[in-house]
């Protein structure tokens, strides 16, 4: 909250330049439906979001080059390396089969055996790597004919070689333990531990450094930042202007369809159809345009929420408030073009009630779409559910069939359908207190008499479901309030399940996290930390005396897998090395 806008802009420009994104800063990121930046640039955008934090000193990046071409992978790691040096930030990166060009960008590399033992930790030095993984033999240079990844991962994958207690992997781990690199590492860790403050002092310093609030920014600051971002996205989105054009076109089409109605019984039926079509059209359009935009925003929202950038409730409320002006514009365009063209009830009170009802249906359609976005895994399923449910709303809306003509078993659906309340309220708004011509009656003498129909009687013939609740004015007010109540209830459901379903659907754009638990299983005779047992306890691991400190050991579940080759034999685990590369002054 204490950072000025100029400092934020400088930081953004610095990160963009450091990650090589300055030339695409005005380009949308894009998705499968909207072309944007390249795959490598998308990865750099994600890294840049994390670099924006002024308090972060260590970045943990897991397999960030997956799916990228070799040139994009090298460019991404190179930009991260340069950004870390500029920001004096450390980065811990895990990669699968990195090329020598990428490995050369790292300051240190860490190689772990299949059971989590350090087999190498040090600089990118081919000679030292060869001495650890091949040994100081006469033909070591001849055996080292591939890449660095081949050198450290070229382990036999047969069950017989893995069962060998003196496998190449165990030999490499033993050589590293006996090397000067390991002795230097132990000495550096011992010095760090010796110079570190006590646990009580560290906890006090950490408590003072960390904020007592869940988010680093206040709620007011979150609202201002998210609102500014939302406004920018609205005006950048071409669909915003398309919605205005679509509303104008539909207003003209609907108005022209009902423009020739007379003030008679046929005209009353036509105006009833206009009211129903306007209700159905507004509800359908508002949901149809909200779903695609919501799914585009959901990926970014899930990523930001996973990093606890801001509150999900704040983001949802801001979206609701900023979508309201566009809803008002759409409803105003459709109603202002068609209402007077069709010859509806004159007077400002009648028009603004009609407009307010359409705005309420716009809010209901958008809230309904946001609920479907929260519950649906894909956009296709949300679109299908939206079409089917809105069609159901229209079927029991009260126009055709009317309320009393609906099967009693299904009549209750009219009470939970926003279209029913909108249709009822606008029908009362149009026909209450007016008189229009009825049928032309010709007697036996050939004299024609034109009968009249009272609007109140016409409403009774349409079987208004809530007519016995009070006067028509009271029912009309109740209906418009119920429409906005529908929108409020749907948004309350949406804001809750948007957070709940984040844990359901976030895996579609991000791999599941590994399960990390503490382990205190230690074989002190061989100076090895085993992984045969994973515990939840807080007991400290006891290391040999020459280590000089008591670190916490971690075991990561599901890093290895079992293959049952024969039902009569036990499972075996293929062993391989995992490379973790380290950039920056971590040690």
Image (cartoon, helix red, strand yellow):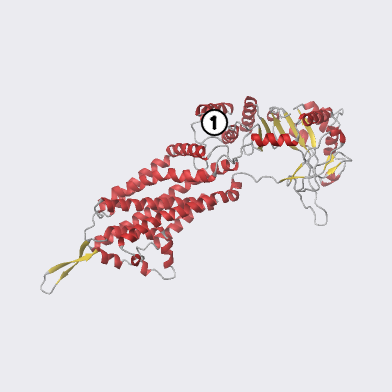
* Residue 538 lies in quadrant: top right
Image location (x, y in percent) of residue 9: 51, 28
Q: In the image, is 161 to the left or to the right of 321?
A: right
Question: Taking 379 as reference, is 205 above or below it?
Answer: above
- Position in image of residue 334 (x %, y %): 33, 48
Identity of the residue furthest to the left in this view: 445
Residue at the limit of the structure toward the right, as seen here: 525
The residue sitting at the bottom extreme is 444
Query: Image point 31% across, 56% down: which residue?
Result: 274
- State the SS at label 1: loop
The x, y position of residue 255, in whole percent, is 28, 51
Residue that numbered label 1 is attached to: 2
Total marks placed: 1
Q: Is residue 283 visible?
A: yes
Residue at position x 66%, y 37% from top? 207
* Residue 287 at least partly seen: no
Identified at 33% across, 45% down, the residue is: 248
- 580 relative to 284 in the view: left or right: right
Task: Identify whether 259 is placed above or below 50.
Answer: below
Crowd tier of the residue under label 1, counting other residues whose Cα lies within 10 Å: few below 14, some 14–19, many 20 or above: few
Which quadrant of the view contains residue 52?
Answer: top right
Task: Quadrant for the C terminus, please.
Answer: top right
Quarter of the N terminus within the rendering: top right
Q: Say left or right for 437 vs 522.
A: left
Q: Is residue 58 left or right of residue 561?
A: left
Between 204 and 34, the one nearer to me in the picture: 204
State which quadrant residue 117 falls in: top right
Q: Position of residue 86 (x, y in %)?
A: 62, 25
């Amino acid at each position: 909250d204490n950072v000025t806008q100029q400092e934020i802009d400088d930081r953004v420009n610095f990160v963009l330049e450091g990650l090589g994104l300055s030339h695409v800063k005005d380009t949308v990121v894009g998705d499968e439906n909207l072309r944007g930046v390249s795959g490598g640039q998308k990865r750099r955008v994600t890294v840049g979001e994390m670099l924006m934090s002024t308090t972060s000193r260590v970045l943990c990046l897991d397999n960030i080059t997956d799916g990228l071409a070799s040139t994009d992978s090298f460019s991404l790691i190179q930009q991260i390396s340069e950004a870390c040096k500029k920001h004096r930030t450390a980065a811990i990166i895990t990669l699968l089969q990195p090329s020598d060009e990428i490995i050369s960008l790292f300051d240190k590399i860490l190689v772990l055996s299949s059971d989590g033992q350090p087999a190498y930790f040090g600089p990118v030095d081919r000679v030292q790597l060869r001495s650890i993984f091949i040994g100081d033999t006469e033909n070591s240079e001849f055996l080292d004919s591939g890449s660095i990844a081949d050198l450290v991962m070229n382990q036999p994958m047969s069950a017989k070689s893995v069962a060998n207690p003196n496998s190449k992997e165990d030999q490499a781990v033993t050589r590293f333990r006996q090397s000067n690199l390991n002795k230097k590492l132990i000495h550096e860790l011992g010095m760090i531990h010796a110079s570190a403050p006590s646990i009580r002092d560290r906890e006090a310093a950490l408590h003072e450094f960390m904020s007592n609030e869940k988010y680093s920014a206040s709620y007011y600051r979150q609202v201002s930042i998210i609102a500014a971002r939302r406004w920018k996205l609205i005006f950048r989105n071409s669909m915003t202007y398309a919605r205005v054009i679509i509303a104008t076109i539909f207003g003209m089409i609907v108005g022209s369809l009902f423009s020739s109605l007379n003030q008679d019984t046929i005209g009353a039926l036509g105006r009833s159809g206009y009211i129903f079509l306007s209700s159905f059209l507004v509800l359908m359009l508002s949901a149809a345009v909200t779903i695609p935009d919501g799914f585009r925003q959901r990926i970014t929202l899930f990523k930001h929420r996973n990093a606890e950038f801001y509150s999900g409730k704040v983001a949802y409320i801001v979206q609701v408030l900023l979508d309201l002006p566009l809803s008002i514009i759409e409803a105003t365009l459709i109603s202002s073009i068609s209402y007077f063209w069709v010859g509806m009830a004159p007077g400002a009170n009648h028009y603004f009630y009609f407009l307010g009802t359409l705005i309420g249906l716009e809010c209901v359609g958008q809230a309904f779409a946001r609920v479907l976005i929260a519950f649906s895994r894909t956009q296709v399923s949300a679109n299908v559910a939206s079409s089917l449910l809105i069609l159901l709303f229209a079927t029991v809306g009260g126009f055709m069939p009317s309320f009393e003509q609906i099967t009693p078993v299904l009549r209750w659906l009219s009470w939970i359908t926003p279209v029913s309340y909108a249709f009822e309220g606008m029908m009362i708004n149009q026909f209450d207190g007016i008189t229009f011509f009825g049928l032309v009656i010709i007697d036996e003498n050939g004299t024609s008499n034109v009968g009249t129909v009272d609007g109140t009687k016409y409403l009774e013939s349409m079987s208004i479901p809530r007519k016995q609740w009070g006067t028509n004015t009271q029912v009309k007010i109740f209906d418009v309030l119920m429409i906005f109540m529908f929108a409020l209830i749907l948004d309350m459901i949406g804001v809750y399940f948007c957070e709940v379903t984040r844990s359901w659907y976030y895996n579609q754009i991000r791999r599941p996290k590994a399960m990390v638990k503490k382990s205190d299983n230690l074989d002190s005779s061989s100076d090895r930390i085993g992984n045969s047992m994973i515990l939840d306890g807080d007991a400290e691991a006891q290391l040999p005396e020459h280590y000089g400190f008591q670190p916490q050991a971690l075991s990561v579940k599901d890093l290895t897998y079992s293959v049952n080759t024969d039902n009569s034999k036990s499972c075996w685990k293929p062993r391989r090395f995992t490379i973790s590369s380290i950039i920056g002054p971590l040690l």
